[in-house]
Image: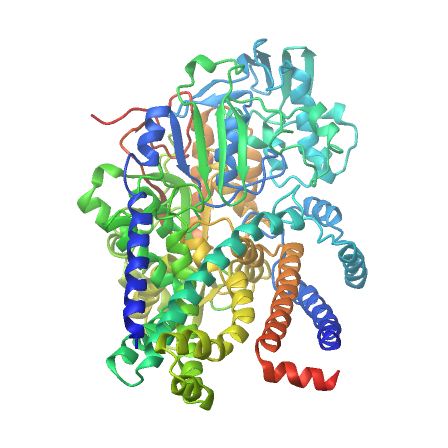
């Protein structure tokens, strides 16, 4: 009689051998990154899957990364200095009062189908971007133009009243409401990029969000690369476009973007030689990299602030002394060193320091004794009688860690009872929208490098001001005085005043300034860190390490 | 038999309708909409967006027009991905998820079945405890732990297999298939062990042995057929589970399958996408349950006999 185990054993052996044979092919040879470096193909970890490629519809950083390779606006930026460089406009004149810009487009700028890029393309594209029916979330980027906001809200229907005019085929004139010092930066934002009218109209109406025009094979683009492949949740491949006006400067042959929403997976892909660059890095990996491979990690200040927003409508937070006491008992240095792994800078104001030369006021510091006094003045000596309250945050490990630390600090220094509540992202947004919170975690990333992008949030009833804060003087400065300021110093002085008012009222408790965190392969060059986390692919190249 | 299939099929229609209706209203009751975002949306933009996706109509109107579209096989446009239809998204992810599910199933049946049979041959010895202990580990270990562990060992330390991807480099399908299949392998091991143990004590096996059949033939020819029956009934629901439950594995290994779309859709409040995938998966699950019932009937002579008597 045959022992059945004999056959089973043989069988298992065969399986093991087969598996080993299958595996042995996987690890040999060069990695994807090494091959990419040799062939000039950049493998780019891009966060999440992009929504789409229509510059007037999508929003988000991953979308921005891809769109930026496919489309170009009037101007570009230098990645080292963030100074404006010519894009499709080769030069421009600014009127003495700063309200009129005349752009001279380069005649050799071509669409990817060979058509010329003209001033009319810009005018039509901006009309589309502002069309009420399109529902462009970033339409406010064009609001500095005369009558743009009126057109976008439907108050006027005649686009010829909006401050953009075609002078001739290659000359475009822009008229602004006020001299807006950051306007050129906005012309490097994808919501102001031109799109190809004939292509859009071939696939539907100008305001159709369901159109197929921005798909592989259909899309016509203006930038240095063209769209070649787009596998949903898999990858997007763009390749260098020979007909781009500055193609000689482009050293990369292709870029492949990977959706990498899971940070752990992204880090593993990097370690396995599949990515040149990661979009982010989880906090717990930072000390490991700093210790073992500091040359692979790049951490730089980012134009964003992490803060706690206070619902100033509800007692006891309607008392400014309470808000100040809370702000003064967050030990930001300790928080930055421990929970945040020593990579962030503590924030005492909402505008990040060094925003193009602006330095925010510092009106308070960590001072538990003074905070206790303030709380006692407000009627809660040693926290007695202070109602228990909640910190609301959206479900994420790092937010939880920070909230736990702050909960401890407030309890220790003020004797108040704090509990934590986490909500899924959209629920959390709804709670804030309805003022259904006491203290909530919040972050804000600037749209452009200027204090205005942070300070105009807190105007009375501003869409992003969910704190109930309202101050007529603050509104006056941010909405009227600062835009009319004659020079940068005067303007920054006004912003300084406004921010001081904000911090005296403390509707928000600033915590830290954001940092961009990436892993970068040593072969990736010309992608310097800057506060916008901005790349200009004319500077990027791949060079094998020696 | 056909009447049985027809009856089960008819039963499934109200179930699917109920799934659609409940999902339709539940997603709309969830706080936050598809267009709520960190940045404030102006009322004009909000209105324009709602108009583009018919959200400006009343809820019953939306429901009726959704059902009308669905009757034509149209799941509607995705809210999150402008210019893409839900049909397109489902059919871009489905083949990949199905392939992953198929390989995971192979892993589960092969490893699980083998372990169960080996264990059943010498119950309550080390030959039993070993595979069953492993099976228990397989059942208990969540894929978000097993996946990264396998990647660490085989992808990073040994560098035998790629850490992520699907079909982009050789061997990248092995680790995800094992990760997804492991839990099911554990169940199948336990099912096949108990099935085999039950069959081994049956009279017809004693008869087979008594007439001098070699042991391996007794097992492969006679015992396996009856012993693996519980496994067959389990396969239908298991495959449906593999299709709808592959989200974690797809995320860990960067696989562009349906599971990722499904979960992302819920977070994005992509109403049509949530509805589309839920309806689609519900239909699949019902179909696979039906299929496994039919298979079980076909494999089991006693069940077959019962049907014959009825019809």
> Quarter of the image holding residue B17?
bottom right
Evaluate whether residue B231 shows in this view.
yes
- The percent coordinates of residue A81 (x first, y second) are 37, 24
Residue B286 vertical position relative to residue A205 in the rendered view, above or below: below
Quadrant location of the C terminus of chain B in the rendered image: bottom right
Q: Residue at x 55, y 49 (%)?
A: A464
Q: Residue furthest left?
A: A291
> Quarter of the image holding residue A108?
top right
Count the marks: how many? 0
* Left or right of residue B21: residue A506: left
> Quarter of the image holding residue B300?
bottom right
- The percent coordinates of residue A480 (x first, y second) are 58, 35
* Left or right of residue B250: residue A15: left
Residue A166 vertical position relative to residue A51 in the rendered view, above or below: above
Quadrant location of the N terminus of chain B in the rendered image: bottom right
Residues A332 and B121: in front is: B121
Q: Residue at x 32, y 58 (%)?
A: A15
Residues A231 and A389: in front is: A231
Residues B291 and A18: in front is: A18
- The percent coordinates of residue A329 (x first, y second) are 31, 60
Q: Residue at x 79, y 32 (%)?
A: A157
Evaluate whether residue A528 shows in this view.
no
């Amino acid at each position: 009689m045959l022992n059945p185990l004999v056959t089973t054993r043989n069988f298992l052996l065969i399986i093991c051998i087969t598996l080993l044979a299958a595996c042995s092919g996987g690890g040999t040879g060069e990695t994807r990154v090494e091959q990419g470096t040799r062939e000039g193909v950049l493998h780019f970890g891009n966060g999440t899957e992009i929504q789409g490629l229509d510059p007037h519809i999508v929003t988000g950083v991953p979308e921005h990364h891809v769109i930026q390779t496919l489309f170009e606006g009037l101007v570009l930026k230098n990645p080292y200095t963030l100074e404006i460089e010519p894009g499709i406009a080769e030069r421009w004149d600014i009127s003495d009062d700063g309200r009129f810009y005349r752009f001279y487009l380069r005649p050799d700028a071509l669409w990817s189908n060979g058509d010329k890029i003209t001033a009319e393309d810009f005018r039509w594209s901006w009309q589309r971007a502002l069309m009420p029916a399109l529902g462009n979330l970033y339409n406010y980027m064009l609001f500095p133009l005369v009558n743009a906001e009126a057109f976008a809200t439907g108050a006027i229907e005649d686009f010829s009243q909006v401050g953009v005019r075609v002078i001739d085929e290659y000359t475009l004139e822009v008229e602004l409401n006020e001299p807006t010092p950051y306007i050129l930066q906005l012309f490097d934002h994808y919501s102001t990029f031109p799109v190809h009218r004939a292509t859009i109209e071939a696939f539907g109406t100008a305001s159709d969000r369901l159109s197929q025009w921005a798909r592989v094979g259909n899309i016509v683009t203006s930038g240095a690369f063209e769209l070649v492949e787009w596998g949903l949740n898999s990858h997007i491949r763009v390749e260098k476009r020979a007909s781009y006006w500055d193609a000689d400067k482009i050293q990369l042959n292709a870029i492949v973007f990977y959706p990498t929403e899971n940070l752990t997976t992204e880090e593993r892909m990097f370690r396995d030689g599949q990515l040149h660059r990661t979009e982010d890095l989880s906090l717990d990996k930072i000390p490991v990299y700093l210790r073992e491979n500091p040359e692979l990690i790049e951490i730089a200040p980012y134009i964003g602030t992490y803060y706690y927003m206070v619902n100033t409508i509800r007692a006891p937070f309607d008392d400014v002394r309470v808000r100040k006491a809370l702000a003064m008992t967050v030990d930001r240095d300790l928080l930055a060193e421990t929970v945040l792994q020593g990579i962030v800078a503590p924030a005492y104001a909402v505008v990040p320091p060094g925003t193009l030369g602006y330095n925010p006021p510092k009106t308070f510091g960590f001072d538990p004794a003074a905070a206790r006094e303030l709380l006692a003045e407000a009627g809660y000596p040693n926290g007695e009688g202070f109602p228990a309250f909640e910190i609301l945050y959206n479900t994420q490990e790092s937010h939880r860690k920070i909230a736990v630390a702050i909960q401890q600090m407030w309890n220790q220094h003020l004797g108040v009872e704090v509990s934590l509540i986490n909500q899924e992202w959209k629920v959390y947004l709804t709670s804030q929208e309805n003022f259904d919170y006491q203290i909530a975690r919040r972050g804000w990333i600037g749209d452009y490098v200027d204090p205005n992008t942070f300070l105009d949030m807190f105007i009375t009833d501003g869409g992003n001001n969910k704190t109930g804060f309202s101050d007529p003087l603050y509104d006056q400065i941010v909405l009227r005085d600062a835009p009319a300021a004659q020079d940068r110093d005067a303007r920054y002085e006004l912003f300084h005043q406004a921010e001081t008012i904000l911090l005296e009222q403390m509707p928000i408790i600033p915590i830290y300034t954001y940092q961009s965190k990436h892993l970068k392969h040593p072969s990736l060059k010309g992608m310097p860190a800057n506060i916008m986390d901005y790349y200009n692919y004319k500077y990027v190249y791949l060079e094998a390490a020696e | 038999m056909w009447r049985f299939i027809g009856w089960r099929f008819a039963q499934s229609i109200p179930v699917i309708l109920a799934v659609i209706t409940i999902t339709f209203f539940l997603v709309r009751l969830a706080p936050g909409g598809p267009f709520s975002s960190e940045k404030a949306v102006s009322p004009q933009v909000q209105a324009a967006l709602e108009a583009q996706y018919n959200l400006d109509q009343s809820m019953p109107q939306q429901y009726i027009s959704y059902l009308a579209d669905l009757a034509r096989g149209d799941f509607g446009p995705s809210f999150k991905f402008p210019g893409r239809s839900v049909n397109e998204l489902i059919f871009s992810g489905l083949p990949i998820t199905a392939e992953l599910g198929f390989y995971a199933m192979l892993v589960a049946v092969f490893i699980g079945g083998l372990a169960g049979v080996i264990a059943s041959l010498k119950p309550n010895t080390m030959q039993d405890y070993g595979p069953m202990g492993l099976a228990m580990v397989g059942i208990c270990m969540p894929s978000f732990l097993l996946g990264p562990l396998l990647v660490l060992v085989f992808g990073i330390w040994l560098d035998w297999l790629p850490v992520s991807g699907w079909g982009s480099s050789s061997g990248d399908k092995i680790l995800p298939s094992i990760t997804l299949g492991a839990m099911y392998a554990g169940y199948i091991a336990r099912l096949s062990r108990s099935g085999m143990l039950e069959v081994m004590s049956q009279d017809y096996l004693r008869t087979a042995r008594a007439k001098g059949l070699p042991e391996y033939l007794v097992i492969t020819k006679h015992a396996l057929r009856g012993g693996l029956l519980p496994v067959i009934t389990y396969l239908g629901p298991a495959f449906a589970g593999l299709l709808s439950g592959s989200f974690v594995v797809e995320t860990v290994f960067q696989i562009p399958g349906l599971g990722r779309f499904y979960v992302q859709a819920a977070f994005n409040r992509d109403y049509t996408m949530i509805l589309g995938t839920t309806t689609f998966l519900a239909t699949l699950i019902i179909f696979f349950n039906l299929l496994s019932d039919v298979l079980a009937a076909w494999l089991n002579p006693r069940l077959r006999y019962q049907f014959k008597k009825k019809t």
